[in-house]
Image (cartoon, rainbow, N blue to C red):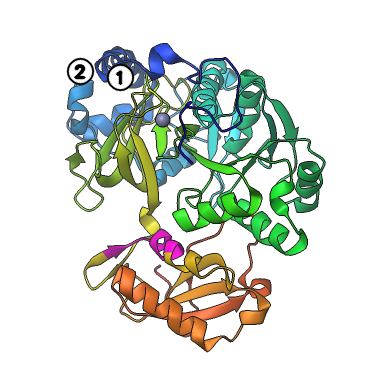
Amino acid sequence: MAITTNRLKNDTCERDWIWEREVEAAPWEETRRLSVAAWERQFRRLRESSPFYARRWKEAGAGNSFVSLADLTQLPFTTKDELKQALDEDPPFGSNLCVSPDQAKRVYQTSGTTGSPSVLALTRGDMETWTVMGTRSYYATGIHEHSSVLTTFGAGPFVAGHTHFVLLRIGARSVPVAPGDTERVIFGLRAGLADTLLATASFAQYLANRLEKTDAEPSTIPLTHVVTGGEPGGGIPSIRDHIQNVLGVTVTEVMGIGDVAPSLFGECPHQEGMHFCGAGHVWVELIDPDTQEPMEIETGAVGELVYTALTREAMPVVRFLGGDIVRIEGTSCACERTSFRMRVLGRRDDMFIVRGVNVYPTAILSVVGDFRPRVSGRARVLRTSPGTSIEPPVPIEVEVTERHGSDDALIADIEDAIHARLTFRCQVTLVPESDFGEAGYKTRLTRNAPLPSGQRDER
Ligand SMILES: [Zn+2]
């Protein structure tokens, strides 16, 4: 349905649909000027108070002279592993802490998918900055003061908990439910406690699948808006359409990066990708994922986003490799925001190569989703060897309802569709919902197959 008002359908409120119009709708040159000035202060501060960056820049030969925002590419990238090393060499906050420990007023932990968790310290100023960027992002999705928001993001230990401050700032009604408490989510939605749901795409998809089975008309539940975050999915057409059609809602997406800001991108009701909402506080570069050479942020460009914290006090990152491969969808919008819009294609780590062609598992999801209702919409690639290359046929597990557990015709249809649309051969295994696991939160898009005994795992 065409949006003509820059608002969600049925939203008749009078408030501006842009939270901070003077920043979010400013000409890009003005944003750049603001960022140049902020970076000048940040650079000097880092050099004086961050042992981590002072040392790294010296090692990289950046010398003692000032490096301007335009010359940022002279400075080295920062990786997740390096931040972990910084933490290990000076616990509990790390050698990248730029303030005295008593100024750290809030501490989140990261999920630590490999090894022990990492910590993220925030000053009072950092908390405010995160709230500012988060408010722009969530307000952009159409969450306004009159919205009632059921959120499945816990208060902690993860940064998504910061969303509670954002909802308070917008002035929306907040209905917090613990992550994974499906029964209470369904109760809250049926009871009309909320018109908006914040969840991972996997959970929203799970909810749609479940209500499709149990309710004669799930779209009569008084839910009108689902905001997905934490993983791609909400931006994949087959997944988005399914959630929208079953629940009778509009789906928009938000995205953040733990080490930078929990919400940094928000999609407006035009549904054409997520707007960058960090202007003035975060500087973004786009690089070629293979060569790491800078790329122009222009419509159609595909690359990895790199982030520099311009105003962060406690733990600023400089040229942080976020690991998400995105496609730039546009650099202007009918909603009048002037920041670029993008969609996430997948994590760099999830990418694999089939006969020289890069493939992201999200592309597989968009093909598999078309086989609903025989499939649930979830699928993952099975990695059978170390390294990123996979020899076809690529092993893929597809989640199905119990009834289709051994449906040979379905297997053949999916294999053909993937070959036709993604041009590689695959071998599909159907996995019933009860065996697929991880229902309801985030879905890992690749899984390591067991290795023959005695072989070392380097995946
Ligand atoms: Zn827009």
Query: Which segment is the magenta one?
Result: 358-366
| The quarter of the displayed image where residue 358 is located | bottom left
Q: Is residue 277 above or below residue 329?
A: above
In the visual, does 272 lie left or right of 191?
Answer: left
Can the viewer see residue 363? yes
Q: Position of residue 75 (x, y in %)?
A: 23, 32
Q: Is mark 1 within 8 Å of ligand 1?
A: no
Taking the spot 72% from the left edge, 57% from the top edge, the residue there is 211
Mark sitting on residue 133: none
State yes or no: residue 419 in magenta. no
Mark 1 — residue? Answer: 43
Q: Position of residue 271 (x, y in %)?
A: 45, 39
Mark sitting on residue 66: 2
Q: Is residue 206 above or below residue 425?
A: above
Q: Is residue 240 above or below residue 44?
A: below
Taking the spot 47% from the left edge, 68% from the top edge, the residue there is 368
Taking the spot 27% from the left edge, 18% from the top edge, the residue there is 32
Secondary element type, mark 1: helix
Q: Position of residue 331 (x, y in %)?
A: 29, 31
Is label 1 in contact with label 2 (beta carbons under 8 Å)? yes
